[in-house]
Image: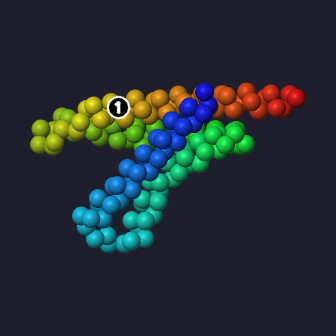
Amino acid sequence: MKRILSSFLLSIGVIWTLIVGWMYLALSGIAEPISVARVMFYFGGLLVGPLVLIAGSILVLAGRRVKPGSILVIIGCAILTITVGCQIPSMLHDLADPLIVRPPIGLCVGTLVVTLLADAGAVQIFRVARRVSRRLNDD
């Protein structure tokens, strides 16, 4: 069960990283940055969440550091939830303005569902890791 959840969370982290990379490439193709250092700092900050999620998932999949991996997964999913939570209201706000192109509601709902599934998977992985560590400490 933890392998399936870890693989799912690993794929979410990889997709998230690809989306950030695509955003960087798209925006760098539109305009020349005023400060390359600021742009790198900004997009580097956007990559913290997916890299933490990927690292935690790999640790859980490896099976050696399950508890630290599960903590990293929880932190990565919290960053994902905060990121999506900040974006959804702005997308819904755009629905009220007739002069702005309507955002795809299916994409918003799909992103929200995937985020909630990732959170549920992270909590489940943390519970399994806690049970495993308790068993190891009891022996």
* Residue 61 falls in image quadrant: top right
Q: Position of residue 114 (x, y in %)?
A: 42, 32
Vertical position of residue 98 compared to residue 20: above or below: above
Left or right: 97, with 55 as reference point: left
Residue that appears at 49% across and 33% down: 118
Q: Quadrant of residue 76?
A: top right
Drawn side of residue 94 relative to residue 46, left or right: left
Going by the picture, which residue comes out furthest to the left? 99
Q: Position of residue 111 (x, y in %)?
A: 37, 35
Q: Where does residue 130 sit, x and y in percent of width and height? A: 71, 30
Q: Residue at x 80, y 27 (%)?
A: 135
Q: Camera-side residue: 103 or 114?
A: 114
Say what amino acid the circle numbered 1 marks: Gly
Q: Report if residue 131 is visible in the image.
A: yes
> Total number of numbered labels?
1
Q: Estimate the x, y position of residue 35 in percent, counting from the top left.
A: 37, 72
Scheme of colours in the image: rainbow
Residue 69 in view: no
Point out the image quarter for the N terminus: top right
Residue corresponding to mark 1 = 110
Q: Measuring 42% from the left and 45% from the top, which residue is drawn there?
A: 15
Q: Around disc 1, counting alpha carbons within 10 Å, would you say few (fewer than 14), some (14 to 19), or many (20 or more)? A: few
Q: Quadrant of the C terminus?
A: top right
The residue at the point 42 percent across, 59 percent down is 43
Figure check: 14 above or below 131: below
Q: Assign a secondary structure to mark 1.
A: helix
* In the depicted structure, whether residue 28 falls above or below residue 15: below
